[in-house]
Structure formats: C-alpha cells, structure tokens
Amino acid sequence: MTICVFASSSSRIDKKYAQAAAELGSLFARSKMNVIFGGGGIGLMGVLADAVIENGGLITGVIPSFMNDEGWGHPHIDEMIVTSDMGDRKKTMFARADAVVALPGGIGTLEELSEAITLKQLGLFKGPVVILNTLNFYKSFIDLLEQMITGNFLRTEHKGIWEIANTPEEVIVALSNDKGWIDDPRKIAKI
C-alpha cells in the first residue's frame, strides 16, 4: 500500500506535531506501507521522511521544478520526481497513492486535503482519506465539514469520505481496517 502524505513544511511549529510525524513515519515503515509525499526536506515533511528512512521504509518525493531549483527537496529519499508545476505534483501523487493522510499544515496542506475529499466525493479517488488531528489541529475544519452537512452543502453520506485519527496509531488502524466507501459516489454527488 502506498500512502500519499500531505504535511506542513514549517519548522517553526510546536515540537509535538513533529513527534507525531516522526512516530507516523516509523509506523509506516514498520507496517511496510510505502510513502509518497511533497518531497520537502523541512517541517513535518522532513521529519516524516527522516523517520521512514531511519526505519527502513520506502519513500518517494514529488516536487515542482521551481521548489527543486530552490533546494527545498529532501536529500536522502529513495526517489524524487520533479514535476512542471503544483498541479502536476498533486496529479502524480494521487495517481500513485492507495490512500491519503493529511497531517497538520498550512494553506497548501488544506488545499491538498480538500482536493482529496473532492476527488473521492466524485469517485475519482477510491482510497481512504485520513486526517491526523494532532493536538486537535483540524477541529475548525472538521466543524466546517459538519456545518456543510447540516446546511445540506454535503450529504450525510459524505461523512464516509474521511476518517479522523487523533494519534499516529489510529492512522494505521484506519488504513488497515478501511472497508471502502460506496461503489458509485457519483450517484450521491449531486445534492
């Protein structure tokens, strides 16, 4: 199983986020789950990658050429794919992934997570989408999703698109126990 991970590139965040990212990277490697991520060498991306590597796991980075030219890529990952732009980066990551996991992050991570939810809603991505809610980071986003459901912007069935995990261990359980969502999501995509 290949897990697409979206995560912060900031190194200025609370160390507890980094501890969770390192633990998750270790768990991925020990669970024989391959990782594909944004290719960054700093922040939660770098911490996660280091943990996967240190524990003998396989990790692939996907980075746009302008970021690669700036030297933002992780120097020790197994494979680095350089894309023409941010859109191609996401397409490549989704195409190679069996599942998506979002760690805490900034606006880029939020955009990537939102796209994963949208693609699954439309049946264009079939795998699990797990939100790692370290330190209750995603509370406001989860509340917004709930508001979308209660306001009929999403169906109640759409809650099956994502799963919330509060610890790295819960991420592994969610991925391992995924039973799929619905066979034809487009039947309920239109509200």
Image (tube, rainbow, N blue to C red):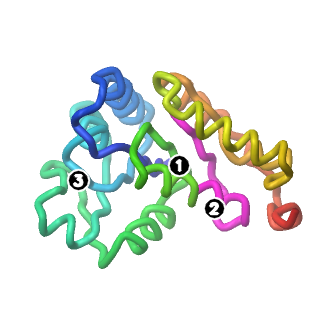
Sequence-earlier tag: 3 or 1: 3
Q: Disc 1 residue type?
A: Val
Neighbour tally class for label 1: few under 14, some 14-19, many 20 plus, Cα within 10 Å? many
Q: CA distance from mark 3 to mark 2?
A: 25 Å
Q: What residue do we see at 29% from left, 31% from top? A: 13
Question: Which structural element holds mark 3?
Answer: loop
Q: CA distance from mark 3 to mark 1?
A: 19 Å
Check contact, mark 2 vs mark 1: CB within 8 A.
yes
Q: Which residue is mark 3?
A: 78
Looking at the image, which residue sits at the far bottom? 84
The magenta segment is 116-132
Q: Which is more foreground, mark 3 or mark 2?
A: 2
Q: Left or right: 172 with respect to 180?
A: left
Q: Nearer the viewer, residue 81 or 73?
A: 73
Q: Which residue is mark 2?
A: 125
Neighbour tally class for label 3: few under 14, some 14-19, many 20 plus, Cα within 10 Å? few
- Residue 119 in the magenta stretch? The answer is yes
Q: What residue do we see at 78% from left, 49% from top? A: 158
In which quadrant of the rendered image does the C terminus lie?
bottom right
Q: Which residue is mark 1?
A: 100
Q: Quadrant of residue 88?
A: bottom left
Sequence-earlier tag: 3 or 2: 3
